[in-house]
Amino acid sequence: MLVLVASTGAAVSVACDAASSVGAVGDALASHPDVAVPRRDQLLIFEGRRLEGETRTLGEYGLPERAGDAEAAQDEEEPRFKRDAEYVFLYRKSALVSDKSEKRSSSSSSHRNEPLGDGDRSSRDDPVHTTCGAISIEIAPTPPPPRSDGSHPLERAAVAFFVDSSKKAVPVTNDQKGSESDITVDVSETSSRLHRLVALERSLEHAAARVEATNAASTKRVNASATLTRATRVRALAADAASASAETHLAAALAAHAEFMRRANERVRFQTDLLSTFEDDLETLQTTTLFFPSFDESGERKKTETTRETKTLLDLVDVSRLREKRDAAKNAHDSFVAKLHALDSRVARLKQETELLFMTLPEVDVEALEAELESARDALRAQNAIVEEVRADAASARAIAARCVAALAESSVSTEDSAETNDSKDSKDSKDSAETMADGRSASARLKTNQLISAEEIDALSNADASHASSSFARVAATDDVLAAFHAHCATCASAMDANARALLVKIAETQNEIAKLRDARFAFEEIADRTEKPFCFLFGACRALPKRHAACLAEKARRVAYADRLAARARRAADLFAADREEERERRDAFRKTLVKTEERFFGKGRTEKSAFVSALDAVTNATLGSVSSAPSVEITVRGVSRAEAGSSLGPEPEKKTNEETKKDDVDEALAAVFAESL
């Protein structure tokens, strides 16, 4: 898991898994040489959450799977950080304390006479955390090329060959003197080229040493610049992560505060309205009259209005106590409103300061710095190409010199062998002697024939040496100057980012503390608001609850009266309908009787004697046919507004007496009709 150290800008990899505990990771970081932050001074943050609990595992926080990791560059081992990834950040608690808090803590610790531990030191006093400046990088001095003192292997080989071979040379005849002069000229030119080769080799070796020293310094500058750039990026990421966490907490705190202020303002408006209309409410209570019913000695309610007892709503409450409650409620209300305004101003000030803090951009553009680092690496690659070119020329000079040394050594051996052969064969004839002298001059002849070093090679090396002296040195030095300036710029940026990040982290820590204090203050205000409500409860009961109850009861009374009137009207209409139906039924029965009488008179005429003989039979037919038909029920509506006498008169004359079964059935019908009337 990759851990970014905010105080140093280091990116530390810790071997762990989901089962590893937070305490084990903290111990590993405390013992890491690139961290050196004591365990009690560590503050591990991931996604705005603090990794706490010695025994809690990383898996509970979604680590290490959800933690971002650094990508390694293709050509370098330099890590590159992803922009949208979430990293685990390590902050120093002591570095998140402002200067005032440090002074207070140091003064309090001095009063206690307790030495400060490692975790209580500020990051400014820790040498591990102050190395954000430029490292002093100097080019190693290169000694000048040595003069020609005969110590070079090629010089020794040439001296050994030319001097020793001339001493051992055999006198030549007059016929061979012409060719001897040519050989001498060739040997002189070859010797001059060899001396020139020695000088060129030493010059090119010196040039290679110079550019290598400069290149080594340039490489150190680029590596140091990369380290400073990475530290700058880590500090920027740590500051951004802390800002995002603070912004999230601030948004949640502002939302909770807005909801609290909404409820508090509603409560304040209600209390203000209750206090402002207190005198008007008292006048309303004074003018609102109540009529209490009177009861006689038997406990029955009297119906006359003159016997009612009259009171006002104000008579039902203690006015002096009510005014005392009003004064107490007003004092509590004014105090609560003042504290509420102070809290709201405090939150508004915190919001403004935090927004300004978030809007404050760092003085260092990390993306531009990383782009400049890539340009510096490209310049270093170009410088490496020049150095390789100088090295190649120096290696070519060394190879030619080694070849010449080997050739001279081989020629010297051949000359010595020829001289020994001449000394051992003095007794031979003149022909053999001439051949021996020719062999003595064979070494010089081979110098001309084999051409140890050509003029073209000397010219090529001379041109390369001149080019390096006039151009390569200047280009390598110019690149080193650019990289040195960039290194100083990276050191300045790292120092500025360190100062900005530390100041930002301190302000963010103060903001987080202020957010926590505001949360506690809001909880305290909730309790204060609940206590402020108590004196207003009595005021509300007297000034608002009594009139509202009276108004509600008046509305209910009006509704009940309207309902009674409406029900009485419906009962009257029902009684009229029943009476009309009964009258219609009576008329139809009378018409039926008259029809029967007319029919009988038509057949019997005036003879009553004949009719009397059939009376019993006619009655039997009537009773058998109509006797099974039940009579109409007798309904009596006794609803308020319809008297029994009125209901009876509307139903007509008293019906005839009925049998027991008919009476029971009529009673059931009357009960149903009464229920129907009550429902109406």
Image (tube, rainbow, N blue to C red):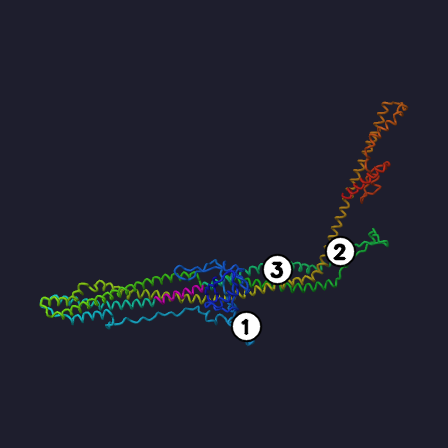
**What range of the chain is rendered magenta?**
215-232
Which residue in the protein does label 1 denote? 105
Q: Earlier in the sequence, mark 2 or mark 3?
A: 3
Q: Answer left or right for 85 relative to 323.
A: left
Residue in the foreground of this view, choosing between 619 and 76: 76
- Contact between marks 1 and 2 (CB within 8 A): the answer is no
Q: Quadrant of residue 451?
A: bottom left
Label the magenta part by its dominant secondary structure. Answer: helix
Q: Which residue carries the number 3 mark? A: 260
Amino acid type indicated by mark 3: Phe
Identify whether 476 is placed above or below 109: above
Q: Identify the mark nearer the N-term, 1 or 2.
A: 1
Residue that label 2 marks: 288
Q: Nearer the viewer, mark 3 or mark 1?
A: 1
Tell me: 679 left or right of 420.
right
Residue at 73%, 56% in the rendered image: 547
Report the Cα–Cα distance between label 1 and label 2. 68 Å
Q: Within 10 Å of the Cα at label 1, are there few (<14), some (14-19), or many (20+) other Cα atoms?
A: some
Q: Residue at x 24, y 70 (%)?
A: 153
Instruction: Classify mark 3: helix, strand or loop.
Output: helix
Residue 229: say if magenta.
Answer: yes
Please tell me whether residue 433 belongs to the stretch shown in magenta. Answer: no
Circle 2: residue type: Thr
Q: Does dot 1 land on a helix, a strand or a loop? A: helix
